[in-house]
Image (spheres, helix red, strand yellow):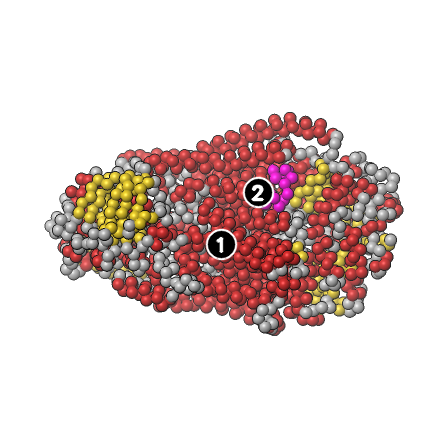
């Protein structure tokens, strides 16, 4: 008996689909005509709302989109690649022409960028990129990749740690979850940095899943195991750092230097009250906003040069000294950026990235240094040619010159960390650029 | 033949303990510090949340139902506690517990009145609670500065024995009493064994089910508030890990999902085992991959040791 | 029919042990073609075991079996069936959620495979339908078995025996019936046996039943087992039921198992329960019954006459549309079991496993279950273990339950399980007990005990409303008999110690 | 006579109840078409189907153990395991990779079945444990990174379009699904699995090799999850230890909403598709409608409980209590 009801089901569904198809062409045309003028839809994708980093990320993208007079859409994927892709393609189906944001796993970048080129959607992304996969591999619709260099962040963390514990001490390393490229590379950078300090050593490293409770429990066990020999803990994000701080406090270890990454409202208080020694800020909201702006510019006819397709972006080190400045500037209700000013199309001459940006040379990209190329893959030679033609140097200079609005640069009073840094791997070894106010 | 059976069952009784001893000895020999008072306290502290939640879960599973909303519920109550802490201080915890009870009641009432299988009701509610919690906390951690609320975990009512270590022990005692000594507990077993027969014996099955769900809710709430006060903030999804772990703990202990067989002490065993292994592997600094494999293997081992097939029609 | 004494099946010196305990000891029987052989004996006498050995469910420890002079030792039940021996089990052997035809050919599908490995469903259904018509079973093969009536399901199992043996090219199946009538009412029982006798023209039957009367009427020979040994053979033609009974228990037994002699008719004339105009459209209508203190009121009628629904409704398991129930003079609102229990009314369902006992809990907990809350002081809800255990021991002794308090209920015999159910209510010292077929699937010995127990508690002023399909039980036990017919009361009749109505008298009001 | 009346009434209820999922689906589609005009775009519907096709295969897979009264919680583990192991052995993305994914899926399922049927452990905990193990293996092999499979053949399995406008994964998944529906309803295997779900002891006595068919059920589950993995990896062009998280609950719910009871013996693979559609349509529609994720959670909860409630009406008329 449920068999025939099932038949009914299928027939009904088929009907609906056909109706839908006819309907879609009708409405489709309307959409097109409507789309021509008036505000456009701009999509920003990110993993989950339940994460302070992405929360401010969302804020940035929203402000930028609305500043450009467009309609803001956000889509989260709970770190599920399949959801991420299907979000993008269903929005592409509904004629969203500008997309930007973060992809849950590095591998899904490939399919995402193929998709935007299939669907002719302008796309710009941040933080995660597939191994050996450049915008030029995907096609013209993938405009720019923004990347605060994870290795450089880690290396800086290492130096700061060494300084904090007087170049001599035992430290621990809390990584994110396995497979988070950013997390692991930060850890790697940290260890590389420590090699310059004979007195420094890494007792143990552990995955803390980027969560406060895991950070707590791992640290608690470390404290039992290593007792009070611990001098410092470097964490690849700040939630774990706070967890570690709580554990130390409970065990009565007061002078353990803890350094975290990603500065956001909620965690600044721990920096202020000294339970954290330092936090590295990577300007999440700015990344989101700038990516949106790039998509917008491309939609309005701007085309990135080869060198611009992959850009390394600025980050800062926060300590008690400049914590207040950061809170005042970035933790208000509105972000301090002038989004319109970032647009190349709205301000062809006096545009301003409002952050330090340096082109990345894929051939020497720190992210891929230890990853072997897939069989038969080669970085498009455009990059090599651009490098040879000196385009990289030009672009680097161009962005430096336009970087006038120094809101993102800490005040010089807050020495020694009064710089905004960005890695620069134009030369073959990774060097860190910095800009002072 | 009865003799041999009895011998077997007697043996079965001690196998789980043996397993526990072996595991902890293993770590103890590797790391002498593993047995230090300090670490024992640390262990209790680390298992405290899971212990509380699993105790609640025991009530439900004994009835043959399941409560998939424990984790989300913990987060939810933690957030409520954290939000109210500035105004009510310690009182916020009470509200948190009440909220937990409320959620439990909703579970129970939907299960008994609307008659949808508990697994689904609680699963759906899990989603709803996650959403509600995120809305309440605006998706970012709610920091707590109110001292009385923080003392709930870090303060100590008894000598210098921190509450985090004290509370789970108290909870164990209470739950053990309720389940094994009271008529309520007895009727839990009866419901798990044969719901209809219990119903026909004039036991108010529906009431008991609702109450059990409420108890489980309160436990989740307690765990949530405790966690919040320990980490000085209510974080998104902080209770997530409770769901699977608590079910695993209960089942590893030998309480059967079909209901009617098992008990609180078995759950304690399950939680302790999970905690010891977890912490032990932290000591060894194992790769996460190896951890997962070990955990899985030990789960299977523990169940095969604990499960009492003589008490089940057939294993599903 | 017993003319040509052709031997169909022969067993020699069958011995079977269960972990040291002798269930069968050197049993040898011969079964003739086309006969209906009765196997009788008390519970634990080994008759079911013998059947299961023959059917291949159990494997014998020693001894030999021959089927038509061929050595026959089946490895499992399936082999038995494929050689033409199949069994109708006491607990039915059908999968409720499968369709009729699926059940019939379960594990014999190989005869209906298409080349593609797909089952030829249509063929199966047609074949089944054909047989159903031939054997006059009005059930739809393409419906779930759970929708069949109990009686239909039994016939289905018998038909399955014929169909499977036919599949394997055996024209003359040997069918073992283990208590087929335990749960059947008078009419259905007759129906079943009329069929069995009819089928026996081209099949052989072996029958176990606790209803000695029907064994006497329908069997050609009756073999009696006691403690795993064959103690003798009874010829129904020449001997009578009482001899059989005596041979079973191995001692002289009273001819009055219902304890009619102990019946007291002079019970007080105060009403324990009044049922006023109870009505549920199409199930039972306008039922008025008065149940006096200390009386056994028997409620009889054909299956489907609504008497069992009535019982459920009175206890509050199901709702009723109109009418009301007074317990000790004050009315109770409907549909609330717990409330009824508070008013000291208890109910013993017919489906023991489903609703009576909790199989995987110990006997002790089962007994104390209804009174558990009253056994606990209200302050901390703590159960008073001393009181509890003394209560339990008391009733285990008094009801002669052959089990220790720790034993799991599922390990008990039907009789003992029923005693446990009875005990758990008496332990709560109630005023009224509603019994639904109290002796279903219980052997004669246990029956007798249960009856005498009922008499005892009645003496203590408990009133009993007994719903039963067993006419003799109805007549033998009750002080007053109410007969229902198609949902209405067709006759109320006093059944005093010396004024017992005959079966005929009652049956006429049923149909 | 009273019985007949009841019987009739029941049938009517069943008729309606069997239509519930379809009604829900259509209602959702209408609502969403108002919420966002883009929803009923042909391309979007195709998108829904493509997403469903993966869910469908996985859900169909786990339906087998559930029909048997067991449960398979190792979904994520098998997805991750089969994908990653296959990709590490054969990253080229040729036919061999395809075969490996399916084969490994099958083996992992077999292992579950072995533990449940031979060692006689409750499936719930077994699959929970093996889930850890399989994920562990995957992480060990990849250190958590993902393995990109850059081969057109491979990605065409999912993204190619033999019929213009309709991705292959939809068609292929459809065919596979139909085959397995057939298998579950028209073959011995399917029938025996149902029988075990209904009354295990009877099934055993009737001569069904229960252990064998338990193992088969889990193996089928593994194989189908393997198929799901194939389309998933093909679509994303990669295998990763992060894939397939969060599939457990949505698929289980899909199965039950489809009308298969967790107690076993009731329902069937055939109806799982409805549950899957409901869930994917819900997600897609709410995302397109621009509903706040947090609200989405709640809406989902309500709709799911609601539809399960409606579906389980006839069962409830039988049993007056629920676990």
Residue placed most toward the observer, C357 or C319: C319
Q: Give the range drawn in magenta.
A: D285-298
Residue linked to disc 2: D299
Residue A172 image label = none
Dots 1 and 2 on the same chain: no
- The local crowd at label 2, few if under 14, some if 14 to 19, many if 20 or more residues have their Cα within 10 Å, is some
Q: Is the magenta stretch mostly helix, strand or loop?
A: helix
Disc 1, disc 2: CB below 8 Å?
no
Percent across and percent down for residue D266 are: 43, 43
Tell me the subunit letter for badge 1: B
Percent across and percent down for residue C104 are: 34, 42
Percent across and percent down for residue D282 are: 58, 39
Q: Please tell me whether residue C58 belongs to the stretch shown in magenta.
A: no
| Quarter residue D160 falls in | top right
Residue placed most toward the observer, B308 or A386: B308
Residue placed most toward the observer, C352 or C165: C352
Percent across and percent down for residue D301 are: 55, 45
Q: Please tell me whether residue D292 belongs to the stretch shown in magenta.
A: yes
Residue B213 image label = 1
Name, please, the residue furthest toward the front: C330
Tell me the subunit letter for badge 2: D
The span from disc 1 to disc 2 (Cα, nearest Å) is 23 Å
């Amino acid at each position: 008996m449920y068999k025939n009801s099932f038949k009914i089901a299928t027939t009904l569904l088929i009907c609906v689909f056909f109706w839908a198809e006819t309907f879609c062409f009708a409405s489709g045309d309307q959409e097109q005509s409507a789309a021509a003028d008036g505000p456009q839809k701009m999509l920003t994708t990110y993993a989950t709302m339940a994460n302070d980093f992405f929360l401010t990320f969302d804020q940035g993208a929203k402000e930028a989109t609305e500043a450009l007079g467009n309609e803001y859409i956000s889509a989260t994927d709970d770190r599920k690649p399949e959801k991420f892709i299907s979000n993008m393609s269903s929005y592409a189906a509904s004629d969203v022409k500008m997309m930007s944001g973060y992809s849950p796993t590095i591998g899904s970048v490939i399919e995402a960028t193929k998709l935007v080129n299939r669907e002719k959607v302008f796309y710009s992304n941040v933080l995660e990129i597939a191994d050996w996969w450049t915008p030029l591999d995907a096609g013209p619709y993938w405009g720019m990749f923004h990347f605060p260099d994870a290795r450089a962040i880690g290396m800086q963390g290492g130096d700061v740690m060494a300084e904090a514990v007087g170049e001599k001490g035992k430290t621990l390393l809390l990584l994110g979850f396995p497979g988070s490229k950013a997390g692991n590379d930060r850890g790697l950078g940290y260890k590389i940095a420590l090699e310059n300090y004979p007195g420094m050593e890494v007792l143990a490293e552990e995955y803390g899943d980027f969560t406060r409770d895991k950070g707590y429990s791992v640290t608690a066990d470390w404290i039992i195991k290593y007792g009070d020999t611990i001098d410092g803990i470097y964490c690849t994000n700040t939630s774990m750092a706070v967890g570690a701080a709580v554990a130390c406090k409970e065990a009565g270890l007061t002078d353990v230097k803890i350094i975290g990454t990603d500065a956001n409202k909620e965690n600044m208080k721990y920096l202020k009250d000294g339970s954290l020694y330092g936090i590295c800020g990577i300007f999440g909201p700015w990344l989101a906003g700038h990516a949106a702006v790039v998509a917008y510019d491309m939609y309005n006819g701007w085309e990135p040069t080869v060198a611009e397709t992959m850009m390394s972006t600025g980050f800062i080190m926060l300590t008690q000294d400049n914590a207040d400045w950061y809170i005042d500037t970035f933790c208000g209700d509105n972000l301090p950026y002038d989004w319109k000013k970032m647009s190349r199309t709205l301000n062809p001459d006096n545009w301003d990235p409002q952050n330090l940006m340096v082109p990345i040379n894929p051939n020497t990209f720190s992210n891929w240094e230890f990853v072997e190329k897939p069989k038969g893959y080669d970085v498009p030679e455009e990059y090599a040619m651009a490098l040879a033609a000196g385009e990289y140097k030009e672009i680097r200079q161009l962005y430096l010159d336009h970087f006038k609005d120094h809101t993102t640069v800490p005040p010089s009073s807050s020495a020694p960390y009064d710089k905004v840094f960005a890695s620069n791997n134009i030369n073959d070894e990774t060097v860190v650029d910095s800009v002072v106010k | 033949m009865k003799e041999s059976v009895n011998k077997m069952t007697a043996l079965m009784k001690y196998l789980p303990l043996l397993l526990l001893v072996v595991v902890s000895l293993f770590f103890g020999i590797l790391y002498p510090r593993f047995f230090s008072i300090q670490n024992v306290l640390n262990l209790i502290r680390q298992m405290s949340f899971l212990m509380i939640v699993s105790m609640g879960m025991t009530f439900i599973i004994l009835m043959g139902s399941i409560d998939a909303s424990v984790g989300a519920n913990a987060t939810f109550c933690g957030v409520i506690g954290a939000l109210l802490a500035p105004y009510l201080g310690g009182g916020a915890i009470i509200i948190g517990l009440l909220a937990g009870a409320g959620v439990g009641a909703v579970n129970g009432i939907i299960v008994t009145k609307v008659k949808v299988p508990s697994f689904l009701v609680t699963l759906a509610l899990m989603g709803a609670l996650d959403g509600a919690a995120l809305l309440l906390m605006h998706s970012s951690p709610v920091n707590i500065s109110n001292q009385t609320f923080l003392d709930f975990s870090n303060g100590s009512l008894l000598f210098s024995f921190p509450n985090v270590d004290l509370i789970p022990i108290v909870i164990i005692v209470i739950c053990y009493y309720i389940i094994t000594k009271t008529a309520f507990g007895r009727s839990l077993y009866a419901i798990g064994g044969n719901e209809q027969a219990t119903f026909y014996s004039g036991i108010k099955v529906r009431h008991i089910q609702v109450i059990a769900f409420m108890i489980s809710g309160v436990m989740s709430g307690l765990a949530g508030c405790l966690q919040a006060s320990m980490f000085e903030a209510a974080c998104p999804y902080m209770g997530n890990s409770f769901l699977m772990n608590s079910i695993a703990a209960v089942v590893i202990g030998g309480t059967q999902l079909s209901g009617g067989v098992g008990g609180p002490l078995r759950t304690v065993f399950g939680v302790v085992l999970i905690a010891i292994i977890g912490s032990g592997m932290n000591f060894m600094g194992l790769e996460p991959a190896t951890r997962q494999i070990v955990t899985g293997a030990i789960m299977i081992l523990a169940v095969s040791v604990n499960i009492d097939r003589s008490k089940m029609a057939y294993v599903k | 029919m017993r003319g040509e004494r052709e031997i169909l099946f022969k067993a020699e010196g069958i011995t079977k042990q269960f972990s040291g305990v002798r269930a069968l000891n050197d049993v040898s029987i011969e079964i003739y073609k086309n006969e209906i052989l009765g196997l009788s004996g008390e519970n634990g006498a080994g008759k079911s075991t013998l059947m299961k050995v023959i059917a291949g469910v159990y494997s014998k420890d020693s001894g030999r079996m021959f089927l038509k002079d061929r050595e026959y030792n089946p490895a499992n039940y399936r082999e038995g069936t494929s050689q033409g021996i199949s069994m109708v089990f006491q607990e039915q052997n059908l999968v409720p959620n499968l369709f009729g035809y699926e059940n019939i050919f379960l594990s014999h599908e190989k005869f209906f495979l298409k080349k593609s490995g797909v089952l030829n469903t249509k063929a199966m259904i047609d074949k089944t339908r054909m047989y159903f018509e031939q054997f006059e079973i009005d059930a739809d093969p393409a419906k779930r078995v759970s929708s069949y009536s109990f009686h239909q399901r039994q016939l289905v199992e018998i038909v399955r025996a014929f169909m499977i043996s036919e599949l394997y090219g055996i024209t003359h199946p040997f069918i073992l019936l283990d208590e087929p009538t335990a749960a059947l009412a008078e009419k259905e029982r007759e129906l079943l046996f009329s069929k069995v006798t009819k089928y026996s023209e081209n099949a052989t039957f072996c029958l176990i039943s606790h209803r000695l009367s029907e064994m006497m009427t329908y069997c050609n020979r009756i073999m009696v087992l006691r403690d795993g040994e064959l103690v003798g053979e009874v010829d129904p033609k020449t001997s009578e039921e009482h001899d059989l009974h005596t041979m079973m228990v191995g001692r002289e037994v009273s001819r009055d198992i219902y304890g009619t002699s102990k019946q007291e008719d002079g019970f007080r004339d105060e009403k324990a329960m009044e049922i006023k105009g109870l009505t549920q459209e199409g199930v039972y209508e306008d039922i008025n019954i008065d149940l006096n203190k200390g009386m056994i009121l028997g409620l009889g009628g054909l299956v489907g006459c609504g008497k069992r629904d009535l019982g459920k409704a009175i206890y509050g398991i199901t709702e009723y549309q109109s009418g009301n129930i007074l317990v000790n003079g004050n009315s109770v609102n409907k549909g609330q079991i717990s409330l009824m229990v508070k008013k000291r009314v208890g109910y013993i369902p017919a489906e023991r496993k489903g609703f009576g006992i909790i199989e995987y809990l110990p006997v002790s907990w089962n007994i104390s279950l209804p009174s558990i809350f009253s056994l606990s002081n209200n302050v901390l809800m703590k159960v008073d273990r001393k009181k509890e255990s003394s209560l339990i021991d008391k009733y285990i002794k008094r009801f002669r339950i052959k089990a220790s308090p720790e034993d799991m209920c599922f390990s008990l015999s039907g009789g003992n399980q029923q005693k446990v159910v009875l005990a758990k209510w008496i332990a709560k010292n109630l005023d009224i007990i509603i019994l639904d077929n109290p002796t279903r699937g219980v052997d004669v010995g246990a029956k007798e005990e249960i009856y005498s127990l009922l008499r005892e508690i009645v003496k203590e002023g408990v009133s009993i409303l007994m719903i039963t399909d067993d006419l003799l039980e109805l007549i033998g036990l009750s002080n007053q008999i109410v007969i229902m017919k198609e949902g209405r009361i067709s006759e109320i009749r006093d059944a005093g110690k010396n004024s017992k109505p005959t079966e005929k008298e009652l049956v006429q009001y049923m149909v | 006579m009273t019985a007949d009346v009841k019987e009739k009434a029941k049938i009517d209820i069943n008729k309606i109840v069997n239509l519930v999922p379809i009604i829900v689906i259509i209602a959702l589609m209408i609502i969403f078409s108002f919420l966002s005009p883009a929803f009923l775009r042909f391309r979007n519907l195709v998108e829904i189907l493509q997403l469903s096709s993966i869910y469908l295969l996985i859900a169909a897979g786990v339906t087998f153990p559930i029909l048997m009264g067991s449960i398979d919680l190792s979904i994520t583990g098998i997805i991750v395991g089969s994908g990653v192991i296959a990709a590490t052995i054969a990253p080229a993305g040729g036919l061999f990779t395809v075969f490996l994914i399916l084969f490994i899926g099958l083996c992992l399922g077999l292992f579950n079945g072995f533990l449940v049927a031979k060692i006689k452990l409750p499936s719930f905990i077994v699959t929970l444990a093996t889930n850890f193990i399989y994920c562990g293996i995957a992480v060990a092999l990849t250190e958590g990174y993902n393995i990109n499979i850059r081969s057109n053949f491979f990605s065409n399995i999912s993204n190619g379009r033999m019929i213009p406008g309709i991705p292959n994964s939809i068609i292929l998944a459809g065919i596979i699904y139909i085959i397995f529906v057939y298998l579950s309803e028209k073959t011995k295997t399917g029938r025996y699995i149902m029988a075990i779900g209904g009354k295990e002891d009877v099934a055993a006595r009737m001569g069904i090799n229960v252990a064998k068919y338990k193992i088969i059920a889990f193996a089928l589950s593994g194989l189908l999850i393997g198929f799901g993995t194939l389309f998933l990896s093909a679509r994303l062009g990669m295998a990763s230890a992060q894939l397939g998280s969060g599939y457990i609950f949505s698929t289980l719910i899909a199965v039950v909403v489809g009308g298969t009871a967790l107690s076993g013996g009731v329902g069937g693979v055939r109806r799982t598709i409805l549950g899957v559609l409901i869930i994917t349509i819900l997600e897609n529609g709410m995302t397109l409608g621009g509903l706040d994720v947090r609200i989405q959670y709640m809406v989902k909860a309500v709709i799911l409980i609601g539809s399960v409630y409606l579906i389980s009406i006839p069962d409830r008329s039988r049993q007056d209590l629920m676990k």
